[in-house]
Image (cartoon, grey):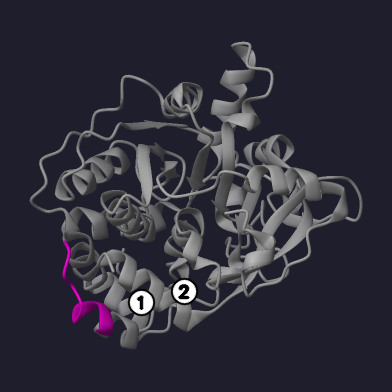
Amino acid sequence: MLNRWSGMGLSLALVAVAAGCANTEQVPSEIAAEVSEINVGRGPRTPVIFDSDMDFDDTAALAYLARQHKLGRIELRAVTVTNNGAGLPGQAIRHARCLLAEFGLSSIPVADGSPTATNSFSPVLQFAVNQILSDTFASCTESTASSSVSAAQTIANTLSSSSRPVTILATGPLTNVAGALSLMSSSGCRSPHLRIQRAVVMGGAVRVTGNADVGPNSDGSQEINIWADPASAQAVVDRLTPARLTLIPLDATNHAPVTAAYLTRINGDQTTVEAQYVARLMNHPFIQFGVASGAGLYWWDPVAAIAASSISSEGVVNYEWIRIGVTQTGVQQGRTVELTRGLSFARVGTSANTAVFENEFLDGLNGR
């Protein structure tokens, strides 16, 4: 997820167990029964699909997921990659393969897809992300070849073959997720959403300013992941509301900035290969320059990863149940808006606890 670099100038070309946490959100009466039903059976070793655009913070999120997988807290079933976000086609899937190989998890399936979207990420932004990750994986020899099975089909296959409902964590444009749900419907699956325990989406800007660059197709009110493919975002909302969609928008992630003080903590606390990777990543000169110059970098996707994978993380994000829609046309296309009627309720992160996030992320990377 990213429109994170424009401020640098780039001269450097779970639905919660509602009654059991400190955050006492009110579940709307219209969907209380469905929320209760979805919560039944939630426990450790949750099957997870991670769909991302392989930005720098997506890789940090994958590091967290990898350690949780090794600890038996989740079961990482597949990693899928969009080619219409921050990562470049070929390079994005390579970086995912590099990371899983570094973590000793090369057996986890990796697939890519979604070559186009309504709106395109800035080429300068993509260049910066690719440079950071290419430098970080300088010794990696993994292939840039596209997967033989598409990302959307891989998601659909993983959902269909699972004996338990799966959590999807999506941290890029939602093209692959929407495509998977469409594939399942067209193949005769009448209710593909029932295969999904939750979809946790890092995207949207509900009550705060967006981070998409102002231009002919944006007035700046949009968050860039949703802006990239508004139609797919609305398709996911339509399929997974009420109750199965958790949105982690900028409203929450704005409370998790990348700071020099926290990077110092990470550098001094690296007891696993996953924590060592994040430290190496965040010491890249582009990121260090961004932090020092106040460019506004955030732990967007790690916040969502914690929300998706850890039952004990309910203190990280504060939630409200909000009816959500996605504007489809005009200069506000891709804007996430609150609706006043209907059943399109999503569990929306409205803020986050910075200190709790930082402790949870670092402890999770180190397997504590």
- State yes or no: residue 113 in magenta: no
Q: Is residue 140 left or right of residue 29?
A: left
The amino acid beneath tag 1 is: Gly
Does the residue at mark 1 contact the one at mark 2 (Cβ under 8 Å)? yes
The answer to whether any part of residue 3 appears in the image is: no
| Disc 2 packing (10 Å; few <14; some 14–19; many ≥20) | few
| Disc 1 packing (10 Å; few <14; some 14–19; many ≥20) | many
**Residue at 42% across / 84% down in the picture?**
294
The answer to whether any part of residue 173 appears in the image is: yes
Which of the numbered marks, if any, corresponds to residue 7?
2
Residue 114, given in percent of the width and then of the height, sits at: 47, 32
Q: Is residue 351 left or right of residue 122?
A: right
* Tag 2 secondary structure: helix
Residue 193, given in percent of the width and then of the height, sits at: 64, 31
State whether residue 118 is above or below residue 17: above
Residue that protrudes farthest toward the right in the picture? 341
What are the residue bounds of the magenta stretch? 265-272
Residue 322, given in percent of the width and then of the height, sits at: 78, 58
Q: Earlier in the sequence, mark 1 or mark 2?
A: 2
Magenta span: predominant SS is: loop
- Residue 6 or 273: which is nearer the viewer? 273
Q: Is residue 45 left or right of residue 135?
A: right
Tell me which corner region of the image, top left, top right, bottom left or bottom right, holds residue 37. Answer: top right
State whether residue 339 is above or below residue 5: above
Which of the numbered marks, if any, corresponds to residue 290?
1
State whether residue 41 is above or below residue 319: above
